[in-house]
Amino acid sequence: MSKFSKILPKTSTTLLRELAADSRHARWTDFVTRYEPMMREYLRIRFPVVEADEVVAETLVALVGALAHYRYSPEETGRFHNYLTGILRHKALRFCRAVERERQMRAALVQEEPLQIVSPDAENDEEAYRQGLFEVAVSTFFAEPSIAARTKEVFRRTAIAREDPETVAHAFQMSRHAVDQIRNRSIAWLRRRIRELETIGD
């Protein structure tokens, strides 16, 4: 077992609920105490050149807004520490890119070769982050009370379970066109939610 695995904190659903309900909750201190060692160890392993203080701080700021929309469901969206490290990756990659841009500007002035500081796994990290955004958006979609249960089920069967739309239309006694409209509207809703999640903490 890796050192990182050993320091993964046990998820407290009570803590997450309290922080989601109140962004100024006093238990943020408990959250930082619980998760900051894991965050710093992750950065040390994957992004050793970043300023850990800055990246951790930006991640915590992003979480203040993100937790209001997050629903802890390991079976549907995975473990919370994966969600947290997804945001941490995003912030670390942004830091790396900003530093690299600065290095390139300096290199253009002094004609020196810029150093490559982005993690070799940056593309994989970005892909994992995008997948995490999608999973959170889908979780929010199914938890949204204003969306009809039939809409959720049509979307689940056509877009997630990949069932034939004609079969779904027959099951719900609606036209194929109606099924396609529900699916397309649901996908548009998810895209808007993903864009909202991308701007959290920016």
Image: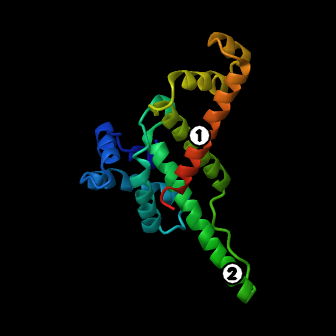
Residue under pointer 2: 105
Residue 63, image x and y in percent? 42, 53
Q: Earlier in the sequence, mark 2 or mark 1?
A: 2
> Which residue is depicted at the point 36% across and 44% down?
9
Q: Amino acid at mark 2?
A: Met
Q: SS class of the residue under badge 2?
A: helix
Give the number of the mark in front: 2 or 1: 1
Q: Residues within 10 Å of mark 1 (few under 14, many from 20)?
A: many
- Tell which of 4 and 73 is nearer to you: 73
Q: Is residue 102 above or below residue 6?
A: below
Q: SS class of the residue under badge 1?
A: helix
Q: Is residue 82 above or below residue 58?
A: above
Q: Amino acid at mark 1?
A: Leu
Residue under pointer 1: 190
Which quadrant would residue 199 be assigned to in this image?
bottom right
- Tell which of 53 and 189 is nearer to you: 189
Residue 113, image x and y in percent? 73, 78
